[in-house]
């Protein structure tokens, strides 16, 4: 009995290790896009991914044919959504890197945009994942795309009076 549990544990660890080897790079990039951190300095993204992968590992035996990538992505999005208010909202303690193009977006806009465009999650699935109506997801995505494609111009030029001679 004990030997069977040990062999199941080894198999589980081997399967999870293979999953992480194949998916961790893309999932880290997704987390980095969500946090709008630089690719080479992304501690919040790494923490998000670590926690999401830990959850996936804890549920590994109960997944029964469920896609572990989709499950981890769902966990990543949920964790980002929960922590976004504390990190970026309210007091605004941690702001995304101003070097990131995605820094112009709100956390919710980044989340919708990354899920829809980078991860290719359908509008209906994104809405269900975030607990929003499909129309709201569509509007958020459109607003985020407009912000990225047509960024606000710099500050308004100051008016200079020219003396006439």
Image: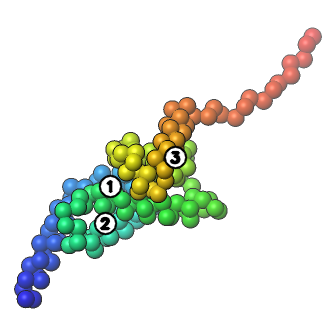
Task: Choose top left, top right, bottom left or bottom right for residue 57.
Answer: bottom left
Sequence order check, earlier mark of 3 and 2:
2
Q: Quadrant of the C terminus?
A: top right
Sequence order check, earlier mark of 1 and 2:
1
Determine which residue is flagged by label 3: 136
Query: SS class of the residue under badge 3?
Result: helix
Q: Are marks 1 and 2 in contact (CB under 8 Å)?
A: yes
From the image, state whether disc 1 or disc 3 is nearer to you. Answer: 3
Q: Residue at x 8, y 79 (%)?
A: 7
Q: Quadrant of the N terminus?
A: bottom left
Q: Are marks 3 and 2 in contact (CB under 8 Å)?
A: no
Image x and y of residue 8, in percent: 12, 77
Q: Is residue 145 above or below residue 9?
A: above
Left or right: residue 46 versus residue 83 is: left
Q: Residue at x 17, y 72 (%)?
A: 13
Task: Point out the residue furthest to the right here.
Answer: 165
Q: Distance from label 3 to label 2 (Cα)?
A: 29 Å
Q: Is residue 47 above or below residue 35?
A: below
Image x and y of residue 62, in percent: 23, 72
Q: Is residue 56 above or below residue 98?
A: below
Image x and y of residue 131, in percent: 47, 57
């Amino acid at each position: 009995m004990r030997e069977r549990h040990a062999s199941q544990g080894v198999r589980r660890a081997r399967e999870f290790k293979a999953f992480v080897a194949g998916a961790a790079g893309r999932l880290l990039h997704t987390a980095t896009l969500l946090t709008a951190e630089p690719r080479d300095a992304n501690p919040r993204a790494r923490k998000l991914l670590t926690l999401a992968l830990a959850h996936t590992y804890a549920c590994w035996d109960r997944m029964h044919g469920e896609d572990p990538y989709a499950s981890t992505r769902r966990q990543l999005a949920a964790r980002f959504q929960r922590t976004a208010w504390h990190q970026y909202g309210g007091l605004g303690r941690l702001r995304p890197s101003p070097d990131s193009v995605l820094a112009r977006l709100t956390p919710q806009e980044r989340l919708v945009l990354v899920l829809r465009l980078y991860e290719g999650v359908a509008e209906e699935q994104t809405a269900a994942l975030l607990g929003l109506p499909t129309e709201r997801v569509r509007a958020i995505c459109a607003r985020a795309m407009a912000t990225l494609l047509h960024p606000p111009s710099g500050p308004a030029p100051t008016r200079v009076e020219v003396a006439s001679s």
